[in-house]
Image (tube, rainbow, N blue to C red):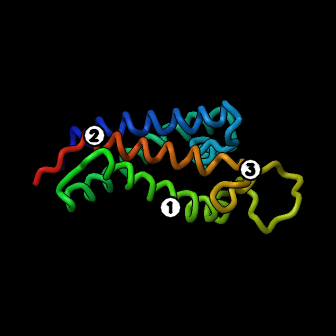
Amino acid sequence: MDWLGLLVGSVLGTLVMTTLVESGQSLGLTRMSFPFILGTLLTGNRTWAKVWGFAVHFVDGFVFAIGYGLFFEVVNRSDWWLGAIAGFLHGTFVLAVALPVIPDLHPRMASEDEGPDPTPMLQPPGFLGLNYGLQTPITTIIAHVAYGAIIATFYRPLG
């Protein structure tokens, strides 16, 4: 595996992906902050949740990049458009499978089945993250497509 290309691609890809998603939140396109959701898995302190969430998100960015690298090795190519397709599939999986499951695992997130609770909790994202806004799927997909394209640009299969 091209570890240097993978490292550079994952750092830059994660940086761009996170910037796009967080910018979408700042611009009012979505209310979702995946780093914040990850951080609140670890702590109830909102400030530290953001710090820990970004750290976990960057580690996840490298771990997922290894999967992309394995895919590029198998197909023996890493064109930007192939990375973009992989990013589209990755983003679709996050929206359709991972987000709806998070409330079952997250100690500080309400589930879809719960009623009002006096304890403040995070709202569940729902299918495609639509509980966080109608633009959430679009921003998430665009960010993941960029992530995959960037990784593919820097990664060179060894075969």
Of residues 79 and 35, the one drawn nearer to the viewer in this rendering: 79
Q: Position of residue 36 (x, y in %)?
A: 62, 41
Q: Quadrant of the C terminus?
A: bottom left
Q: CA distance from mark 2 to mark 1?
A: 22 Å
Q: Residue furthest left?
A: 159
- Name the mark on residue 114: none
Q: Position of residue 42 (x, y in %)?
A: 60, 47
Of tags 2 and 1, the one toward the viewer is 2
Amino acid type assigned to the residue bearing label 3 in the image: Leu
**Which residue is at 52% across, 49% downward?**
141
Residue annotated with mark 2:
153
- Name the mark on residue 122: 3
Q: Position of residue 140 (x, y in %)?
A: 55, 47
Mark 1, other Cα within 10 Å: few <14 / some 14–19 / many ≥20: some
- Please count the marks in the image: 3
Of tags 3 and 1, the one toward the viewer is 1
Q: CA distance from mark 3 to mark 1?
A: 21 Å
Of tags 2 and 3, the one toward the viewer is 2
Relative placement, left or right, of 49 versus 54 is: right
**Which residue is at 23% across, 43% downward?**
155
**Which residue is at 64% across, 48% downward?**
136
Dividing the picture into quadrants, the one containing residue 4 is: top left
Mark 3, other Cα within 10 Å: few <14 / some 14–19 / many ≥20: some
Indicate whether 139 appears above or below 90: above
Residue annotated with mark 1:
93
Amino acid type assigned to the residue bearing label 1 in the image: Phe
Q: Position of residue 98 (x, y in %)?
A: 56, 61
Q: Nearer the N terminus, badge 2 or badge 3? A: 3
Amino acid type assigned to the residue bearing label 2 in the image: Thr
Kindly check if marks 3 and 1 are in contact, taking CB atoms under 8 A apart as contact: no
